[in-house]
Image (cartoon, helix red, strand yellow):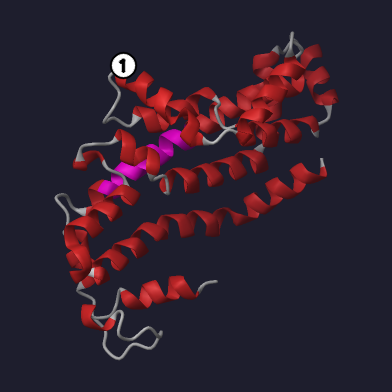
Amino acid sequence: MIYPLLWMVVSSLRPNDQIFSEPGLWLSEVDLSHYPTGWNALSQPFSVYLMNSTIVVLGSVLGNLVSCSMAAYAFARMRFSFRTLLFAIMLMTIMLPGHVTLVPQYVLFAQLGMVNTFWPLVGPNMLAVDSFFIFLMVQFIRGIPKELDEAARIDGAGHGRIFFQVILPLMTPALATTAIFTFIASWNQFFSALIYLTDTDMMTVPVALRLFVDSQGESNWGSMFAMSIVSLIPVFLVFLFGQRFLVKGIATTGIK
């Protein structure tokens, strides 16, 4: 399973004429020039595309954490008309492919003048559109004793204070799980970024890597592999430092 990744790392250190002629993992010659070459191979330094992806990821993570947690609290603790029906409809949207809604979403964002901006990639996450994360948090909140809510309500707290001061601090595992999954999905998002971002200066890392292949062709695969390794480092670090929260969040949610 890990062999393709190791092969990509090794290929980023090989001369171009040896990448496909020597498919093994043994390095007969080390070539470090692919990294500086790939960094400046496109119209902008690769740091520009890393920064664009960072902006999209931070906006998506923050939007999902705020909107999905508030929606989950409403479904788990508040009583309102058609709550069960709305929750069922929300769960049904998990089965709806994203490509089905792509055309109407594009028309909407085009009419709002948001094409070639980061808003189509970040904005929906601020409106609680990820049903999986809402369901995850709902299950987690339902496992928190309601006696805590009642004690806070006796002290005069409303839904706002109960959510921010009682429920939210106890949701760390679920919030961390949401943040990690959102980070990985947003960082690797390709199709939506390809559709909405038309200016090369606005492109994110996955689109830039595809553009890199188009601009370099088959003559400089080593530089493309080198930039692919650079783009994997943030995902690896986030998963490495957040895996204990990820495992805890999924395990405790499943039990509850």
Residue position marked by numbered label 1 in the rendering: 111
Determine whether 182 is above or below 244 in the image: above
Mark 1: amino acid: Gln
Determine whether 21 is above or below 135 in the image: below
Label 1, residues with CA under 10 Å away: few <14, some 14-19, many ≥20: few
Give the side of residue 22 with respect to residue 187, left or right.
left
Locate residue 30, reporting x and y percent: 26, 84
Quadrant where the image shows the C terminus: top right
Quadrant where the image shows the N terminus: bottom right
Image-quadrant location for residue 23: bottom left
Locate residue 43, reporting x and y percent: 14, 50
Question: Residue at 68% across / 37% down in the picture?
Answer: 136
Residue span colored magenta: 49-62
Give the side of residue 105 with respect to residue 163, left or right.
left
Determine whether 134 is above or below 112 in the image: below
Q: Is residue 164 visible?
A: no
Q: How many marks?
A: 1
Question: Residue at 33% across / 87% down in the picture?
Answer: 27
Q: Main secondary structure of the magenta part?
A: helix
Locate residue 235, reporting x and y percent: 46, 55
